Image (spheres, rainbow, N blue to C red):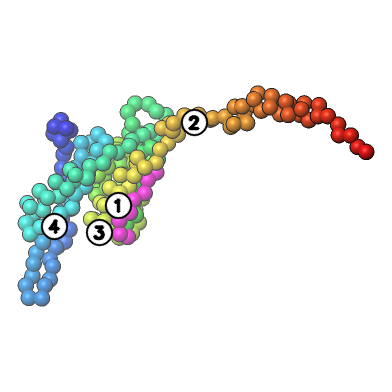
Amino acid sequence: MGDFTSRLVGIVITVPGENGHRKLQRAVTERTRFKVFVAIGDYNGHVGLGVRCSKEVATAILGAIILAKLSIVPVRRGYWGNKIGKPHTFPCKVTGHCGSVLVRLILAPRGTGIVSAPVPKKLLMMAGIDDCYTSARGCTATLGNFAKATFDAISKTYSYLTSDLWKETVFTKSPYQEFTDHLVKTYTGVSVQRTQAPAVATT
């Protein structure tokens, strides 16, 4: 566990609001709070996203880093076309959403790179994805929802199993197939008894 945590790298994705902070207006006074989104990963199949609000930027970043470490998920990687070299893209198309933002991640050929906006690109790079197409709908100007939707899509890569991960199906015989010989003997004995039954005398 120590080696894994030492490989983690954190990046502050966004601090939304004017001049880097959000202003919350109250009845008498004005309170300023900072909302920070932090992505953390090892660039090799693990990524996490943390969100934290605080009166100070340093406190918000520290809290977001802790939450990002607690939300780390494994990222399943695959191939586009031939399975040559190391996995470089997603094994299938995945979709994530948050609020009005919907993000779709599409596998791409080797050498394509990450074709996306800056916010999803940071998350995909930290997840260890080299080639990927992205499609986004909704109010992507809300960078917080944009990052959450991307993380939601990335976390769904293990929710779908491709055919190479399916277990081998073992078909069991039905009772009629398994006990065919026994049923044939029983049926034959009953039919013989019926044919050999004594005739009833009629008057």
What quarter of the picture does the N terminus occupy?
A: top left
Q: Quadrant of the C terminus?
A: top right
**Residue at (72, 25) in percent of width and height:** 189
Q: Is residue 110 magenta?
A: no
- When the figure is inspected, residue 141 is found, relative to residue 84, above or below; the finding is below
Q: Residue furthest bottom?
A: 27
Residue name at image x 34 percent, y 44 percent: 156
**x%, y% of residue 74?**
28, 38
Q: Amino acid at mark 4?
A: Cys
In the rendering, which numbered label is found on residue 53?
A: 4
Closest to the camera, between mark 3 and mark 2, is 2
18 shown above or below 151: below
Could you classify mark 4 by the number of other residues whose Cα lies within 10 Å: few (under 14), some (14-19), or many (20 or more)?
A: some
State left or right for residue 132 relative to residue 177.
left
The residue that mark 2 highlights is: 169
Q: Tell me which label, 3 or 2, sits earlier in the chain.
A: 3
Residue at the extreme right of the image, as rendered: 203
